[in-house]
Image: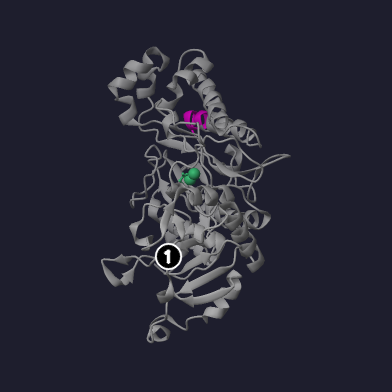
Amino acid sequence: MTDAATYRARRARLAEAMGGRPLLLRGHNVLPRNFALNAYPFRQDSTFLYFLGVDAPNASAVIAADGATTLYLPEPHADDPLWHGEVPPPGEVGALAGVDSVANAEALDGSGCLTLAVADPTVGLAGAVDSSDLTQAVVRLRLTRDADEIAQMEAALAVTAEAHVAAMGATHPGVTDTAVQAIIEAVFKVHGMGLAYPSIVTARGEVLHGHASGTPLVDGDLLLVDAGAETPGGYASDITRTWPVSGTFDGRQRAAYEAVLEAQTAAIELVRPGVRYREVHLQSARVLAAALVELGLLHGDVDGLVEQGAHAVFFPHGVGHLIGLDVHDMELYGDIGYPAGRERSDQFGLGFLRLDCDLEDGMVVTVEPGFYVVPAILQDASLRERFGDSVDWAAAEGWLGFGGIRIEDDVLATASGPRVLGPGIPRTVAEVEALVGIGPNPRQRLLPNR
Ligand code: GLY
Ligand code: MN
Ligand code: MN
């Protein structure tokens, strides 16, 4: 739990960085799902959580030049206690946030305030001025994590670890992908945590952000699980593991898995202050490309293949992103992973790299290389022409139906080196094989009498 003094210190730093004009921060509103009484689950704006920790809908705050803060809360409706339970007294909410005063939302006047420039029109307020300087200042403060934030991320990762281990145990031929997803999300809920993002649980891992569809898993499939818990305070975790439904990797699966693991291990080693994140990406690409040459899927010199981008035929995404209060942290503010002077590449694959800053002590990034056999890529005439003989297209076609492998961890850059956060989630071939299928079938577990 973040304490009031920490919120005050964060607001003071923001006020100092902006020097002068009052700053308006707005929380999220409730979003109706077709009609008002049936709302989407409420999730507070992450910047609002960072500076105030207030999880109530329709809240706002004005921060004065000296950091003094007024929190604006909506007047509860007289019927709220009946339908939603007692509303905590405003003074109590304000004390937890360490604000100087609490006022009714009706009294909020944005005149002269600077506010964040975001795409969501529901957060605008007459009189307030969108400020990209404020956005930059917020991004700057949220780029690195303090010890309290790291502790929260590790708490999420402990639960995520438990969920992945339970999911490995629950995997048997015939079990559906949605049933495995149910086990994962039940573990999150048992611990009082939510989802940092919609879970990806699928034997069609080559669909990068695909989702479970109720499909029974088949002996011979690889199951890709990308799922992470979120703490009640809003901190994310983002973990991917891939395992064989049968409990044993076949020769080809094992070779590809070892290649991705080697690429991930080499990339994690570079997560250190001062290293350009693009180098982390390229390192994983080089290690993977070397393995793909061995497997006969690529031909040529490894550095040349990576420079040309040929590895992206099998690893078409970036190696990761910032993570914190959002799983892709602060992406609502635009391409914040690219500092001034660094442009996104337009090269196939590299163009999907979300982060290209120099890493700093206290940044947390994901490292998530993958290997995918994507029919749409193998059939793409322009890619075939571009990469020509660098890719063994005929050999690649022999892998159609393989699916995908991704291995993802969350890594803190520190002066003394990379620190993989969390309790150590089974990752090697031997660790994974020892766990798959050792638990009950999800139906037996959830519906024991049927
Ligand atoms: N879970 C989405 C991602 O890994 O970026
Ligand atoms: Mn990720
Ligand atoms: Mn992920």
Which residue in the structure is indicated by mark 1?
A: 110
Magenta residue span = 250-256
Q: Nearer the viewer, residue 101 or 426?
A: 101
Helix, strand or loop under label 1: loop
Question: In which quadrant will I find the N terminus?
Answer: bottom right
Q: Position of residue 35 (x, y in %)?
A: 26, 70
Residue 332 on image: x %, y % = 43, 49
Q: Amino acid at mark 1?
A: Gly
Q: Is residue 12 above or below residue 271?
A: below
Query: Does any atom of ligand 1 lie closer than 8 Å to the CB of label 1?
Result: no
Which is nearer the eye, 321 or 299? 321
Dominant secondary-structure state across the stretch colored magenta? helix
The residue that appears at 44% across and 18% down in the rendered structure is: 308
Q: Quadrant of residue 417?
A: top right
Residue visible at 41% across and 25% down in the picture:
347
Farthest right residue in view: 416
Q: Residue 81 versus residue 224: which sits nearer the camera?
A: 81
- Residue positioned 53% across, 67% down in the render: 192
Of residue 294 and residue 159, the one placed in the foreground of this image is 159
Regarding residue 440, the answer to whether it shows in the image is: no
Position of residue 256 measured from the top left corner of the image (x, y, whole percent): 50, 30
For the C terminus, the image quarter is: bottom left
